Amino acid sequence: RTAIVLLTRDLRVRDHPALAAACAAADRVVPLFVFDPDLQAISANRTRFLYQALADLRHTLRGRGGDLVVRHGDPVAQTIRTAQAVAADAVAITADISGYARSREHRLARECTRHRLALRAFPGITVVEPGALRPAGGGDHYRVFSPYNRAWQAAAWRDEVTAPHAIRLPDGLDPGDLPPAPPGESPDAAPGGETAGQHRLHAWLTGAAGHGRGVTERIPGYADHHDDLAADATSRLSPYLRFGCVSPLAVANAARALDGPGPAAFVRQLCWRDFYHQVALAFPRLATDAYRAPAEPPWRRDPAALRHWQDGQTGVPVVDAGMRQLRAEGWMHNRARLITAAYLAKHLRLDWRDGVRWFFRWLLDGDIANNAGNWQWVAGTGNDTRPYRRFNPIRQAHRFDPDGEYVRRYLPELAAVPGGTVHEPWRLPGTVRRDLDYPPPLESPGEEPTWLRA
Ligand code: FAD
């Protein structure tokens, strides 16, 4: 028997239910990845990461006697064509939630039926399958995080599956070329792949070389330090979770096995990821339509202000540092994401969808559920139970970057401004200010910018 495993954003061998089931049921297995032209060119950073992840996966599969088969074109047509070429009788996929992924899955189901292929969809992109938990009071998904978190923590999680030791490809199948990874846009972006993801996970859990210098940068210190902008005290696993280079379930199980507030706080963040996935499944227009009526007046159009924000030239150092980190690394600290997003949506009153699009272009971890879900939370159109919440960027800066280290790391033009004074360059004496190549803060329209005077 021969099975095809159509890979999408499940680029690993460890705890891969679809791959494990195919290897158990069939004697020949084709791990197939199809480059879909509709999905290229959205983000050079993610494309680079994807190529690296595929190269790493090919290396791993070859080490187990198999290969990664690469094709180009429509994933459905290519899957059927490959299945016919090797006389396969089954296709396995990992179920996904976006509108695009679901319509691909429906088309694949139709074509598999037409060609007498058995299609099976498996879990794997989240800890708990999106849609598996339903609120007691009715409804197809949880709208509020806390009750979801309670149900999620109490739920029986599926068992992890072991990686196949040996994989046998059908004879004579051309695996296809995998070109070298094209350059991304961010010079300091993390490398893609299961191997890199495993290193990062291991370092995060154990403090082995490669992540963090002390306990504050690892999981035991997470509860106390995850909001510290300069400490870099979060796992940075998000791109690996995004592409399935690590299994969310395996990460959650590993963290749950540890005692203390750090691991517990970290597991709660993984629950946020699952939460937004079940929201996105139930509300597929999450990236374009308000999940609920805006809490604030409608958005303005101001291309110049948007450009300043995108370029990290708003004149508010903590905002600009976040936006420059995004460009440099294809990643931004969560606290900085909150500050920069709130600055766009609540201070500048620009459309949150412009923020979604900009983040989506740069973020290695950019995905519909978490990106749009979090943007809507910040903009007051999403799941925040306090949609009128305001973030004072200056107070946030002093609280989460008290010495100004984070700001100076990403804003070289302010490198000579000492300590926390770097957060308010407009307070510096005129003579000092004149010598800084740094703009005055953008005005927030229709509102007294009291935060500038706070
Ligand atoms: P850690 O703090 O180590 O957390 C562990 C994991 O938990 C993360 O890898 C992530 O998978 C999950 N997680 C943590 N915080 C959140 C959260 N608020 N929502 C959902 N999952 C979370 N995350 C993405 O993965 N993709 C996105 O496109 C994305 N866009 C965002 C946009 C905005 C405006 C905001 C405010 C947040 C966004 N986040 C997004 C959530 C969060 O900022 C990142 O997941 C986190 O910064 C990734 O870094 P980490 O892996 O070190 O996180």
Image (cartoon, rainbow, N blue to C red):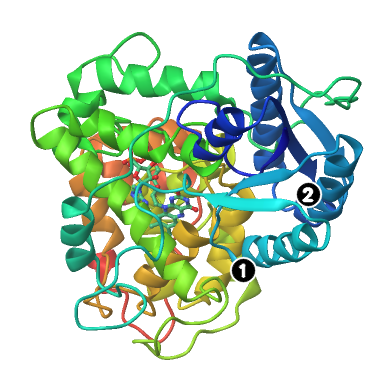
Q: CA distance from mark 2 to mark 1?
A: 17 Å
Coordinates of residue 359 in the picture (x, y in percent): 55, 55
- Identify the residue at horizontal 34%, vertical 33% (top origin): 251
In this rendering, position of residue 447 left or right of residue 401: right
Q: Quadrant of the C terminus?
A: bottom left
Q: Is residue 116 above or below residue 24?
A: below
Secondary structure at badge 2 equals loop
Q: Which circle, 2 or 1, is nearer the viewer?
A: 1
Name the mark on residue 99: 1
The reply to whether the C-beta atoms of the residues labelled 2 and 1 are less than 8 Å apart is no
Look at mark 2 in the image and give the residue it sits on.
40
Residue 196 shows up from this direction: yes
Coordinates of residue 163 in the picture (x, y in percent): 50, 23
Coordinates of residue 239 in the picture (x, y in percent): 51, 38
Q: Is residue 210 above or below residue 348?
A: above
Name the mark on residue 3: none
Q: Is residue 19 above or below residue 267?
A: above
The answer to which of 195 and 291 lies nearer the viewer is: 195
Coordinates of residue 314 in the picture (x, y in percent): 49, 59
